[in-house]
Image (cartoon, rainbow, N blue to C red):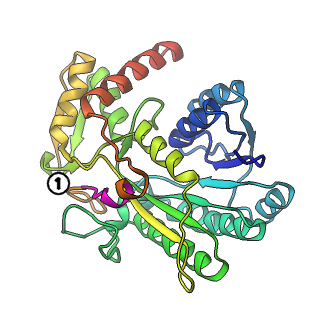
Amino acid sequence: MSPRPLLVTGCAGFIGFHLCQRLLRDGYSVIGVDNLNEYYDVQLKRDRLAQLQEAGLECVHFDLADRHKSAEFFAQRAFSRVVHLAAQAGVRYSKTHPHAYTSSNLEGFLNILEGCRHQEVGHLIYASSSSVYGANQKLPFSTNDKADRPVSLYGATKRANELMAHSYSWMYQLPTTGLRFFTVYGPWGRPDMALYIFAKAILEERPIELFNFGKMRRDFTYVDDIVEGVVRLLDRPPVTAEQEAPANLFNIGNHSPVDLTFFVQLIEKNLGKKAVIELKALQTGDVVETFADTSDLEAYVGFRPDTPLERGIQRSMEWYLDYRRQRGM
């Protein structure tokens, strides 16, 4: 392993937490960055971070959208690789707080690119999203398909990240790998995720809303599979011929979409309670189905996500019920 540490941004976030746990367990030296913003329960972020710090993580607190602080941070450090997970998440939140997305997802990402190119980082892995596929109708979604019809600002900013990364790869030969995450779920997840919105409502005997009258399908991907993909890619930066950009893009999903109604049934089974369901029309910004073609990822690193939804939901609900008890919720 390189003597220089890895940088993980968004280390107190859902995926960042799980990735840092794995890296620290595997013996990597890891530095994290997180601004601990108030998009959702900060205590949940602090609880994740407490576990990581006990395991040896150093976390630096600042906003990556701050150009001067970001430049100063990179000037003072030397990283072998960077995994950029910090972002403003959520499709629906972008309708009411659009500037949060341009600040975090565009300004923040530009500052990461600048830091990586000035420091000559060996590999930048960054989080993109299945949302970039927008109004695409062809299934499964492939990275060879065009992604130029976003249906949400969130999706548009993630597609912009891919184009920005490609330009830096081309201009500065910065090796970049973008990962289009497909509906990631698991323990320690964000409270704005469907899994925990539904679970909380079921436990409190409140109705849950299923949009498009419940006729939705999602390619749910367990968080440990996401982490495995990232870890396998760390030491596999893009290698290209002369006059090409060292830039890769991969889907990382379970390549097995399921009906949203089945997703709800699994939550009900694990909670031992039935949901009260309200059927609603499709919301602006939502897509009816996601389905990842992961053949490129499998060919590159010999791995594709495969955790069954039944097992992933069980683990998630076990954590959720225990965490609620600990917090007195």
* Residue drawn at 44 percent across, 15 percent down: 322
User: Which quarter of the figure has residue 269?
Assistant: top left
- Residue 81 shows in the view: yes
* Residue drawn at 71 percent across, 34 percent down: 57
Above or below residue 250? Residue 326 is: above
For label 1, the residue is 281
User: Which quarter of the figure has residue 144?
Assistant: bottom left
Q: Nearer the viewer, residue 23 or 204?
A: 23
Q: Could you classify mark 1 by the number of other residues whose Cα lies within 10 Å: few (under 14), some (14-19), or many (20 or more)?
A: few
* Residue drawn at 78 percent across, 46 percent down: 3
Please indicate whether residue 43 sits to the left or right of residue 157 in the image: right
Please indicate whether residue 221 sits to the left or right of residue 187 in the image: left
- Residue 85 shows in the view: no
Looking at the image, how many numbered discs can be counted on the residues?
1
Magenta stretch containing residue 295, yes or no?
yes
Q: Residue furthest bottom?
A: 243
Above or below residue 145? Residue 314 is: above
Please indicate whether residue 319 sits to the left or right of residue 286 in the image: right
Above or below residue 216? Residue 311 is: above
Magenta stretch containing residue 193, yes or no?
no
**In the picture, which quadrant includes the N terminus?**
top right
Q: How far from the left and from the top, in percent, is residue 222?
A: 37, 38
Residue type at mark 1 is Ala
Q: Secondary structure at mark 1?
A: loop
Q: How far from the left and from the top, in percent, is residue 94?
A: 44, 60
* Residue drawn at 39 percent across, 49 percent down: 302
Give the magenta-colored segment's residue range: 291-297
Q: How far from the left and from the top, in percent, is residue 328?
A: 50, 14
Q: How far from the left and from the top, in percent, is residue 116?
A: 70, 65
Above or below residue 307? Residue 135 is: below
